[in-house]
Amino acid sequence: MKDYYIFYDDDFIRQSKATLSVLSASTQFGLNVFEGIRVYKEDAYYVFRLNDHLIRLNNSLNQIGFKTEIISSKKFIEIIKELIILNDIKTDFSIRFTYLINEVDSWSSKKNPVFFIAPLIRKRNSFDFHKTVIVTKTRRISSLAMDTKVKCGANYINGRYALLEAESKGADLPILKNKDGFISESTGACIFLVKNGVIITPSLDSDILESITRDTLIKIFLKNDYKIEERHVSEKDLIESDEIFLCGTSAEITPIKHVETKDFKIGDLTKFISEEYQQAVRAKNYLNYNWTTKFKI
Ligand code: PMP
């Protein structure tokens, strides 16, 4: 990967020059909170649902006990503009915005966090690159133990176990059930099913991250007069469904082509929502929701 400029600890530096103590609480215990945010390039740059990402990050900071004021959206845009110029970015790209503790300390550290904002410039998977999934033995962590609404690095080790299990069984991605045996989410993405024409997604009490994309898709479906069932979803629902797709800031809409022993085609509702989502993120439709923050260089 190219050695891009990032913003770290109040300075624009090359990524390779950013340092973190090997004994910091973040290195040792995965003590960090973060967001993955997307910028889409059209006639201008459009950040998708910036305020919602900052609100979620602020909630994560509070819940994990980091004592700091999150930066404003204005300051965030100023930093992004500078990063675009320094890195000469002319395409869509993602941003990793992470708060961490860069001090030699224990997992209970009360030290002030630092933050970095880094552009991630990678080729996006095409919509047709649909995936094979399996329901793993590895369960989703319970929010009673580690709140899944907190976007914290350590929570992703659960996703790692599930992903390793899925890969060892020849699948691309895992679907995790929660402690109660209901379908929860994948690693880094939420899940939607279409069964007998009904759109279904696991409810927020299914130990999922409160996904901003999930919320966007629900609003788009409702606006287009579709009904959504947010409820507990069983493995039987999954297997009996006609269309399945994952969603997330990075995953966007990722169709599923195979679950366990059943093949799926990319269905009409999956195609519909993927097209509408692209219209939304590129500020070509759904403008009254104020989802996009526009800026020019
Ligand atoms: N679940 C998990 C565990 C995730 O990491 C992500 C990616 N942030 C999602 C769901 C999707 O969330 P969002 O739509 O806010 O990106």
Image (cartoon, rainbow, N blue to C red):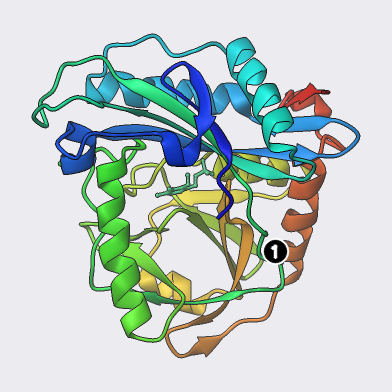
Residue at 80% in and 34% down:
286
Residue at 30% in and 18% down:
62
Kindly indicate the quadrant of the structure image that contains residue 294: top right
- Compared with 29, 178 (above or below) is below
Q: Position of residue 103 (x, y in %)?
A: 19, 24
Kindly indicate the quadrant of the structure image that contains residue 119: top right
Q: Position of residue 189 (x, y in %)?
A: 48, 54
Which is more toward the observer, 102 or 204?
102
Q: Amino acid at mark 1?
A: Thr
Kindly indicate the quadrant of the structure image that contains residue 245: bottom right
Residue at 70% in and 75% down:
266
Query: Circle 1 sits on which residue?
Result: 270
Q: Residue furthest right?
A: 43
Query: Could you tell whether 104 is left or right of 34 in the image?
Result: left
How many circles with numbers are drawn on the protein? 1
The answer, for residue 286, to whether it is visible in the render is: yes
Q: Secondary structure at mark 1?
A: helix
Which is more toward the observer, 228 or 256?
256
